[in-house]
Image (cartoon, rainbow, N blue to C red):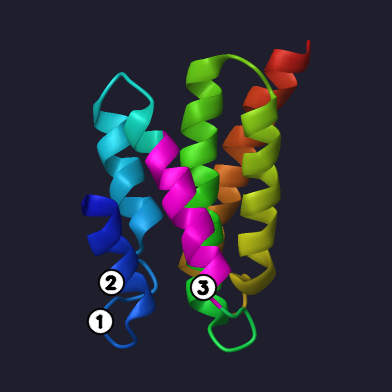
Amino acid sequence: MLRLVALALLVLPGIATAQSIPGNTLSTLGNRESGMAQLEEAVTAARAALAELNRGREPLRWAAAQYNLGNALYTLGEREGGTARLEEAVTAYRAALQERTRERMPRAWAISQQGLDTTLALLAKRRQ
């Protein structure tokens, strides 16, 4: 149910801001529990949002969805212990940074860059 509400907030124009997307809500809930169900739902919701968003028309919402996907994948990867989810998170963060540039959105750029940096650091540690 929560996923449907969050997805509705995303796809209904004018109701959700670029920051209020389903992946973010579910990822936050997933961070509060030790299991992975909410995080898996966050990944699914963010991917569904990305399927609905048109980067050309809504680049900042698209970038926010990529960022939230990266967050959920990072947390899953951190808990799982492998590298696959972390590599997916790197891809999502890099996609978000294509629109969240330092010039265009300095705060969002810094936050997205931090997510990427943290993920790359953990990946490097896991690959040793």
Q: Nearer the viewer, residue 128 or 41?
A: 41
Q: Nearer the viewer, mark 3 or mark 1?
A: 3
Residue 56 figure quarter: bottom right
Secondary structure predominantly adopted by residues drawn in magenta:
helix
Tell me the element at label 1. Answer: loop
Picture layout, residue 8 above or below residue 5: below
> Which amino acid is tagged 3?
Glu
Closer to the chain start, of discs 2 and 1, is 2
Mark 2 residue crowding within 10 angstroms, few (<14) / some (14–19) / many (20+):
some
Mark 3 residue crowding within 10 angstroms, few (<14) / some (14–19) / many (20+):
few
User: Is residue 45 shown to the viewer in this render?
Assistant: yes
> Residue 116: x, y in percent?
62, 44
Disc number for residue 9? 2
Q: Pointers 3 and 1 in contact (CB under 8 A)?
A: no
Which stretch is magenta? 40-53
* Tag 3 residue: 52
User: Is residue 111 shown to the viewer in this render?
Assistant: no
Q: Pointers 2 and 1 in contact (CB under 8 A)?
A: yes
> Which amino acid is tagged 2?
Leu
Seen at 65% across and 17% down, the residue is 82
> Which amino acid is tagged 1?
Ile
> Residue 79: x, y in percent?
48, 19
Q: Quadrant of the C terminus?
A: top right
Residue 44 magenta = yes
Residue 47 magenta = yes
CA–CA distance in space, label 3 to label 1 = 15 Å
* Tag 1 residue: 15
